[in-house]
Amino acid sequence: MNPRDLPAALPGAAASSFPALAQTVHGQRLVYLDGAASTLTPRCVIEAIAHYQSFDHANVHRGVHALAERATTRFEDAREAVRAFVHASATREIIFTRGATEALNLAAIGLGAGLRPGDEVIVTALEHHANLVPWQMACARSGARLRFIPVRDDGLLAVEAFEALLGPRSRVLALTQVSNVLGTVVDLAALLARARAAGLVTVVDGAQAVAHAEVDVQALGCDFYAFSAHKMYGPTGIGVLYGRESVLERIPPLFGGGDMIETVTLESATYAPLPARLEAGTPNISGAVGLHAAIAFLESFDRARLLQAEHQLLAAMERGLSALPGVRVLAAGTPKQGALSFVVDGVHAHDVGTVLDRRGIAVRVGHHCAMPVMRRFGVPATVRASLSVHNTLEDVQALLDGVRETCERLR
Ligand code: PMP
C-alpha cells in the first residue's frame, strides 16, 4: 500500500481495550470488520456491567433500601449521559428501549395513532427494514400513504424529489443518517430544515451514525432520533429514542404496567410524566450502565480526529478494493462513513465471506436488512466491511489480501 494512503492517526491504538481481539480465529489473528452489525465490547464496558451486576443491582424507582437507591442512581445517571451525548435539552426526552428497532417502532406506532386516511408518510429508499416496515404497518393501520425519496446511482438521495413529494397531506419524514449498506451519508440538514418548514414530524435513524460522528439533536433539529447501544461499543438489548418533548408528549404509551402510571383504579389509570410514561416495566438497568460506560469510552477519543482517521482508512479500503479485478464497490467515489459494500463478479457474497472467515476476517454478507437497496443496485447480496476504533491499516490490508485470494480461487 502506498504510504500516502496512511491515515494521519490510526485509531487502532485502542485494540488492547478489546478482550475479543486477543484471540485467534481458525488459527489466524482476528480481523473484525463488522462493527456496523455489532461492535466488539471494550473491557471498560464489560467491567462496568459486571460491577453493577455484582454489587449494585436491585430494581429501580421503587425501593428505599441502599441497593435500590444505588441502582436507580446508576440508571438515571446513564440517562443523563445519553442526554449529554446527543445534546438533548432534558432527560425527559430520553426514552430507553430495547434498541433502534423498538425505538423506531415506538415512534411509528405513536405517530401512526395520529395519522388519518390520505395522510402521507415520506421515507427514503435507503432505509434499513427497521425504519421501513414500522411505517408500512402504521400506514396499513391508519389508511395513510407511504411515499419514497429515491436513491441515486451514487448512493445519495435525490433531494429534489423530496420537494416534489411534499404536499398538504405530508405528515412525517423518516430517514436514516448513514446507509447501513452503502455507508453513504444523508444530507440531513437540508432535508430536515425543509421538512420542518413544511410542518412534518421528523424521525432520524441514527443506528449507523452514533459510533462515528458526534450527534447534536438540537443542531439537527429532528423530532426523533433512534439508536442502539450495541453498535457503539455498548451491550445488546438497550437503545434510545430521543424525542423532542412537545412531540413525545403527544405519543400514547405503547405498553401499560409498572412504572408508567401515576394512579390506578380497577377501571382506569393516569400516566406518569415523561420519560416513565413510555418505559413500562423493569428496564434493562445493566444495559443502561453498559451504555453509559460505552459513551465514556467513545468520548475518551478525540472524536473529530477519530472520524478523520476512519475516513482515511475507509478511503484506503475503497481504493484497494476498486483496484482488484472483478471487484465493484457500490456507490464508488461517494464519501462514506464507517462502512462500504462490494461485490465480486461471478462469486456469491456468502462465498467471499466464508473465504475471509477462514483467514480470521469477519465481515457481513447478505442483504443487510435492506432488501429494497439490494434491488435498487441490482444485486442479491453484498459483502460489507465496516470500521471500528480498533481497526488499522493492517486490517484493511488483510481484507484486500483475502479478497484477492477469493478472486484467484473462486472466479
Ligand atoms: N437502522 C439501521 C441503519 C441499522 O443498521 C440497524 C441494525 N442493523 C437498525 C436500524 C436496527 O438496529 P437493532 O437491530 O439494534 O434494533
Image (cartoon, rainbow, N blue to C red):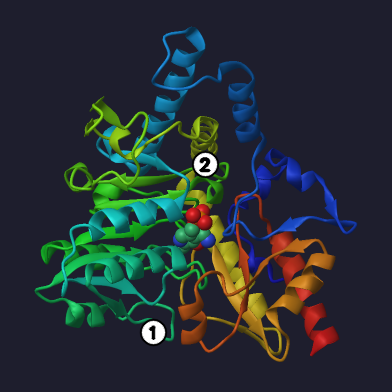
Contact (Cβ within 8 Å) of mark 2 with mark 1: no
x 23%, y 77%: residue:
162
Rendered view: 359 above or below 261? below
Image location of residue 348, percent across then percent down: 71, 83
The foreground one among 319 and 91 is 91
Q: Which residue lies furthest to the left in this view?
A: 168
Image location of residue 287, percent across then percent down: 53, 36
The foreground one among 233 and 115 is 115
Q: Residue furthest right?
A: 27
**SS category of the residue bearing label 1:** loop
Q: Is mark 1 within 8 Å of ligand 1?
A: no
Residue denoted by label 2? 298
x 80%, y 80%: residue:
406
Tell me, yes or no, if residue 92 can be seen here: yes
Label disc, if present, on residue 117 of the rendered structure: none
Q: Which residue lies furthest to the front in this view?
A: 266
Give the mark nearest the N terminus, 2 or 1: 1
x 59%, y 52%: residue:
9
Image location of residue 241, percent across then percent down: 36, 47
Q: Does the residue labelled 2 lie within 8 Å of ligand 1?
A: no
Left or right: where does residue 132 sit relative to residue 193? right
Residue denoted by label 1? 152
**SS category of the residue bearing label 2:** helix
Q: In which quarter of the image is residue 173?
A: bottom left
The foreground one among 263 and 377 is 263
Q: Quadrant of residue 264?
A: top left
Quadrant the N terminus occupies: bottom right
Left or right: where does residue 89 sit relative to residue 13? left
The kind of residue tagged 2 is Leu
Rendered view: 387 above or below 43? below
The kind of residue tagged 1 is Arg
